[in-house]
Image: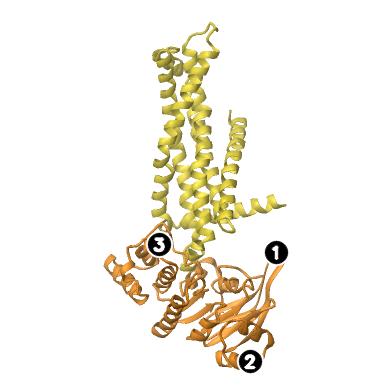
Amino acid sequence: MIEIKNLTKSFGDMLVWKDVSFRIENGDTIAVIGRSGCGKSVLLKHINALLTPDSGEVLIDGNNIFDMEYVDQRRIRQKFGILFQGSALFDSINTFENIAFPLRYFSNLTENEIHDKVMRSLEYVNLEDSAQKETSELSGGMRKRVGLARAIILEPEYIMYDEPTSGLDPETANEINDLIILMAETFDITSIVITHDMHSVLRVADKVAFLHDQKLGWFGTLEEMKKSDDKDLLNFITASEYSIK
Amino acid sequence: MQGLKELGRYSSLLYQALRSSTEFSTYRKNLFQELVKVGTDSVPIIMLVGIFTGSVMTLQSAYQLEFAFIPLSTIGAIVSESILIELAAVISGLVLAGKVGARVATELGTMRVSEQIDALESMGFNSVSFLVVPRVLAGIMMFPVLYVVASIFGIGGGIAAGYFSGSVPPADFLKGARMFFYPWNVVFGFLKSFVFGFIITSIACYKGFYARGGAEGVGKSTTEATVLGCIYILLADFLLAALLL
């Protein structure tokens, strides 16, 4: 379980958000929504301590990640897989090696076992034919899927998606949404999806956290969101072309 | 104030690198790759720089001493001593600030802005150990080797220029070089190249590691790494000469 308690972050004089608190239960898929620039990705990078807050705590299974030594933080980070906004694939190695990369350093698997595991991971994202492609040859959607295959390779307990459907056509975005659901169901992974794509929220989320006006503006289940009369939340939702009522 | 802040962050990165240097298994593979990129790949340009520096020095010394009634071997002494004590290390350093410094800053800067460094950290890697330590180690290990290459080709270029221009016979050149040879000058040149290797790679790593923004940010960090590398080489050259000669 992940518990975010009174998290406050600013960059210099610019306050990003203040006193953000919510809880992510095991097995949940939670969508963090909000306008561009409201600090959604910054929040994601606090959950596994890639960034440090001004104050507040992030408890992973009851332990505050910011109180840990760097060595312990690194161990905790391996419980997380992240699909970054731009996929963050290593451009000096090909698709296969990108996915095999964590295994080569953090497992004792033989070369054959690594090969089988990488190919199985590529099968999940329907890219088994692209194993030997250079990352520069991959389309935006393929890069996201390779990023996802790499994110799950160490069998994480939690997976975080940073704008997984941004920049993709609706059909490819739907494929990514389906993969998020598939990952959550197949591996029983707790998922955190950073997005402003309401279509994606409606497809994948169990709960929604809405960042607004430098604070947590609203938090609840998807069903509660559909019935909510919170003015700011409604403004954000109705600005989308999708009707949820 | 900004300068002090930068110095603090640079020192902090170096401290982290020093602490991480014990994690040999993390950077072993990268270290060998960097030794090739910094060392072997730089040999052609260093040979070229050495040959032309030695040749030009010989021709200019011969021109300046044309009407002086001194032995021709003096030209060999001037050229070889200048190369060993100053030019091989400094000119190689300035050239490598462009070649190696710019490459390192661009690589790390691109990795930073495309979230590849975040991806490494999120997998549980110590990114300083993985990226910074091998590059700095390769710099301090390979620059002295490149100093030797520059010295050999510099003196060789001087002998060739003297022979083909008819200004100094090789025997006279070598006689002068041997007559004024002091082993300390070679030790001093080694020491300088060691320091320059550290300066260039550590500044480039710092600028790349903390690059911000997109392509413009990477360009800025690359330019700063190259310019600062050159400035600090000249400053270190002066300080070492003032302290050790």
**Camera-nearest label, 3 or 1:** 3
Q: Nearer the viewer, residue A29 or A114?
A: A29
Amino acid marked by disc 3: Thr
Q: Nearer the viewer, residue A234 or A189?
A: A234
3D distance between C-alphas at marks 2 and 1: 35 Å
* Residue ID at (51%, 63%): B115
Q: Is residue A70 above or below residue B225?
A: below
Q: Is residue B157 above or below residue B202?
A: above
3D distance between C-alphas at marks 2 and 3: 43 Å
Q: Nearer the viewer, residue A159 or B19?
A: A159
Amino acid marked by disc 1: Gly
Give percent across and percent down for residue A155.
40, 76
> Mark 2 = which residue?
A228
- Whether callout 2 and callout 1 share a subunit is answered yes
Amino acid marked by disc 2: Ser
> Mark 3 = which residue?
A135
